[in-house]
Image (tube, rainbow, N blue to C red):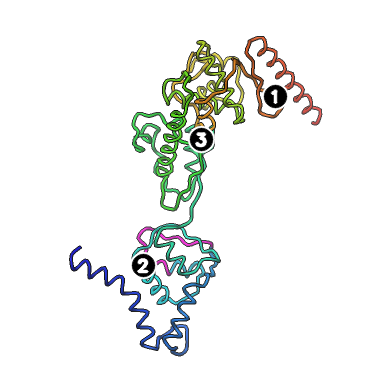
Amino acid sequence: MDLVGRKRGCLVVLVAPMMLVLIVLLGLIARPDLKHYVPGWKYYEHYQHFAHTPLSASAPSVEIARGDSLHTVLLKLRKAGVQSGSDLEWQLLAYQVGAAGNLKFGDYALVPAVSPHDLLQRMRHGKGEHYRFTIVEGWNIRQLRAALRQATPLVHRTGMLDDATLMAQLGFPGEHPEGRFLPETYLYQRGDSDLDVLRRAHAAMQKALAETWAARDPALKLHTPDEALILASIVEKESALSTERPKIAGVFLHRIARGMRLQADSTVIYGLGSIYDGNIRKRDLKTPTPYNTYVHTGLTPTPISMPGQDALRAVTRPALGDALYFVALGDGSGGHTFSSSLQQHNAAVARYLQRLRERESKTKERQ
């Protein structure tokens, strides 16, 4: 650092102490809100009390915009109902804590426990309020992007982008976005964008997939992490019970090994897209979309949902067994019956249909 730079640094360090010393040495200081002058040492006590006494405000928070000056922030604090301290005291405190000219944009809570000193420290270091955005396990990319559009106070930069452009913006041109964002709750601050959240979610999925793939069963018949991601996205949609997912993964892997079609309803639904109305009909099972595993053998071209870590672990560490089929119990538990033969499976399907008829009958009786 040159001599001028060193002098400038010393000046910054010495400004606040010098101001405090001047207050004491002068012995007198003007207070706009007092009708007389008070001794400097007495005012210093008053200043310390102001700096460390919890604030009182009528608003829950104050927003600092990018480029706001200390003067602008003080005006916003007054508008938020903060009456404590004179502008001179706030300015002096800002210099003392190094916040003057160094205020970070964001939302800052005016909770009763925060003092002026604490508040300015938070503003200096950008420790504002955090907001939450949750990616739900099993969401597809359409649902994720729709939820992002509703998230506030995110800066929205992706609304007009198609999926291909979105992935290019994230630095992954040519990558399909489905399944690439880890279901988790992400914290963000005012000023962050939807791209920021997606970057973090994408990086989190890369990390989770790499870790689960590295810890995979040595006998696993999948060949790449992407294959594991695709199968995990199907397993995610087939059961909400984490305890069942390793069994379901085992069923699908056994079927793949035998050259059997997966016949997963979730893949049919995904392939139908927006025309799916909540019911799967026999004709839907024959609709030749690229994702229909009743029509095509093997995995789908891409993931069909955002799988959580339980589904990733289930696929890379599947349960042992010989089951080739599963069907819902139909008792409201979300569980399934697993079968190793078609005969057993057909009997389980018959029980499932019988339970459905009984439930429908009871519903009609109550009506």
Q: Which secondary structure lies at badge 1?
A: loop
Q: Residue furthest top?
A: 343
Res 207 → quadrant? top left
Is 180 or 248 nearer to us in this picture?
Answer: 248
> Label 3: which residue?
143
Res 366 → quadrant? top right
> Label 2: which residue?
98
- Residue 66, magenta (yes or no): yes
Q: Which secondary structure lies at badge 3?
A: helix
Assess disc 2: are there few (<14), some (14-19) or many (≥20) residues with their C-alpha within 10 Å of its C-alpha: some
Query: Number of numbered discs present?
Result: 3
Kind of residue sitting beneath label 2: Gly
Res 302 → quadrant? top left
Earlier sequence position, callout 2 versus callout 1: 2
Earlier sequence position, callout 2 versus callout 3: 2
Kind of residue sitting beneath label 1: Gly
Vertical placement of residue 95 versus 230, above or below: below
Assess disc 1: are there few (<14), some (14-19) or many (≥20) residues with their C-alpha within 10 Å of its C-alpha: some
Vertical placement of residue 225 versus 76, above or below: above
Kind of residue sitting beneath label 3: Gln
Q: Quadrant of the N terminus?
A: bottom left
> Label 1: which residue?
330
- The residue located at (48%, 53%) in the rendering is 130
Earlier sequence position, callout 1 versus callout 3: 3
In percent of width and height, residue 357 lies at: 75, 21
Q: Which secondary structure lies at badge 2?
A: loop
